[in-house]
Image: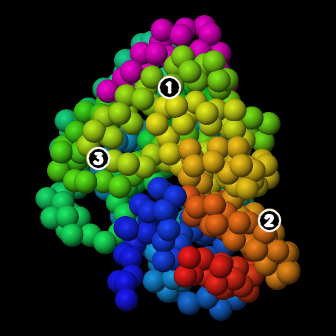
């Protein structure tokens, strides 16, 4: 009788389109408002307000590890309230962005609607030079104090390990954070040299910061957080992507591949499909979370890209707000054919919003567990 696979073996095999004994059970998590609702509807505290990315035994979610090397701005900006009334608050956040936010419904810092972005820290070359001083790759605090102990522990792990945390590094997403969406859209044309300089700096900083980690740990995957698309398509054209972003993706994936990293994920909401061939050419191997409101159907993407691209996500959160039949129809229509094709990890196409009841969540998890077990 064959021994069961461990979580690390399952993860790597499924992303290689190889058979597995069962599919990893992953989910992104829920809004704080969702957990408050579920607690009022009978959920035990065990499943609430936990980092589901790293697993949740109470819910049967499989473990993953994340090497939290700090590649963020250091020091951060001081949080500063600029204006406030009964309904709105305008403030400069820790990365220097000024936003106007709706206070109503906020819980644990999570708002019920997106902030309005008013100003960003980089407006010209001079302000970019000032921001660069906050990205010193040699700062000792970029590595946890217990790093050496983590390295020893990871050598015998039986779960997949991601370099950095989830949602911590991107190429386009960093430009947007520094400059702003509208501003970076015009800067590609108004000052392409500055854009190239910012991208070179961002990649140089990343590679310098993680060199120690690459030399000391064998990682399984790396995730780019981009969120560079809306329902109507990406915020950067294929031509701009090929000129500005592709060289940086290649620099990063080639260095990491030399260090033994096999899988490269891109996280983007919306519909960036016209960029997928360019991502594949850049070394990306997996795309997620496949937002259904933007038409990112995993079955269609599988037919289009075959084994060139693994997929994760793609289960419509809107269907979970309906009845049990709608939930079952959604899962049975997608999970079995996608698992048959391989290279697929099913989970919701984002976090669980608060209009999903705890009863529907439990039913979703029950049906999903039945469909992914024993594959």
Tell me the residue at 44%/41% (across/down): 169
| Quadrant in the picture for residue 68 | bottom left
Q: Which residue is mark 2?
A: 318
Circles 2 and 1, Cβ within 8 Å, touching? The answer is no
Q: Which residue is mark 3?
A: 260
Query: In the drawing, does residue 241 fall left or right of residue 196?
Result: right
195 part of magenta stretch: yes
Tell me the residue at 18%/60% (across/down): 151
Count neighbours of disc 1 (C-alpha within 10 A) and say few if under 14, some if 14 to 19, many if 20 or more.
some
Given residues 364 and 103, the one toward you in this image is 364
Where is residue 11 drawn, in percent x and y?
A: 44, 64
Q: Nearer the viewer, mark 2 or mark 3?
A: 3
Magenta highlight range = 182-204
In this view, 220 is above or below 255: below
Tell me the residue at 36%/23% (across/down): 201
Q: Earlier in the sequence, mark 3 or mark 1?
A: 1
Q: Which residue is mark 1?
A: 246
Q: Nearer the viewer, mark 2 or mark 1?
A: 1
Q: Earlier in the sequence, mark 2 or mark 3?
A: 3
């Amino acid at each position: 009788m064959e021994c069961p696979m461990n979580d690390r073996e399952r993860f790597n095999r499924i992303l290689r389109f190889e058979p597995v004994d069962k599919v990893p059970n992953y989910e992104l998590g829920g809004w704080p408002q969702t957990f408050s609702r579920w607690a009022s509807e009978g959920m035990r505290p065990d499943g609430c307000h936990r980092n589901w990315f790293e697993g949740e035994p109470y819910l049967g979610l499989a473990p993953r590890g994340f090497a939290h090397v700090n590649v963020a701005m250091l020091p951060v900006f001081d949080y500063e309230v600029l204006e406030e009334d009964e309904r709105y608050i305008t403030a400069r956040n820790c990365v220097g962005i000024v936003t106007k936010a709706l206070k109503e419904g906020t819980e644990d810092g999570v708002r019920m609607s997106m902030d309005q972005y008013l100003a960003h820290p980089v407006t010209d070359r001079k302000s970019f030079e000032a921001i660069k001083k906050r990205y010193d790759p040699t700062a000792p605090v970029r590595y946890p104090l217990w790093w050496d102990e983590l390295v020893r522990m990871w050598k015998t792990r039986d779960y997949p390990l991601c370099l950095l945390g989830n949602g911590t590094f991107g190429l386009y997403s960093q430009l947007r954070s520094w400059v702003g969406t509208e501003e970076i859209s015009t800067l590609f044309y108004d000052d392409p040299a500055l854009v190239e300089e910012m991208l070179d700096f961002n990649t140089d900083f990343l590679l310098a910061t993680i060199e120690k980690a690459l030399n000391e740990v064998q990682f399984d995957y790396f995730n780019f957080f981009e969120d560079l698309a809306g329902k109507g398509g990406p915020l950067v054209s294929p031509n701009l992507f090929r000129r500005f972003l592709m060289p940086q993706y290649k620099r990063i994936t080639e260095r990491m591949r030399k260090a033994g990293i096999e899988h490269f994920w891109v996280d983007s909401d919306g519909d960036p499909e016209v960029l997928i061939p360019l991502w594949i050419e850049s070394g990306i191997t997996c795309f997620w979370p496949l937002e259904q409101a933007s038409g990112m159907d995993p079955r269609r993407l599988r037919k289009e890209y075959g084994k060139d691209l693994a997929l994760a996500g793609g289960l419509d959160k809107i269907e979970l707000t309906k009845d049990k039949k709608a939930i079952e129809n959604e899962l049975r229509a997608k999970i079995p054919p996608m698992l048959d094709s391989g290279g697929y990890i099913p989970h919701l196409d984002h976090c669980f919003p608060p209009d999903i009841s705890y009863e529907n969540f439990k039913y979703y998890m029950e049906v999903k567990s039945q469909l992914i077990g024993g594959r």
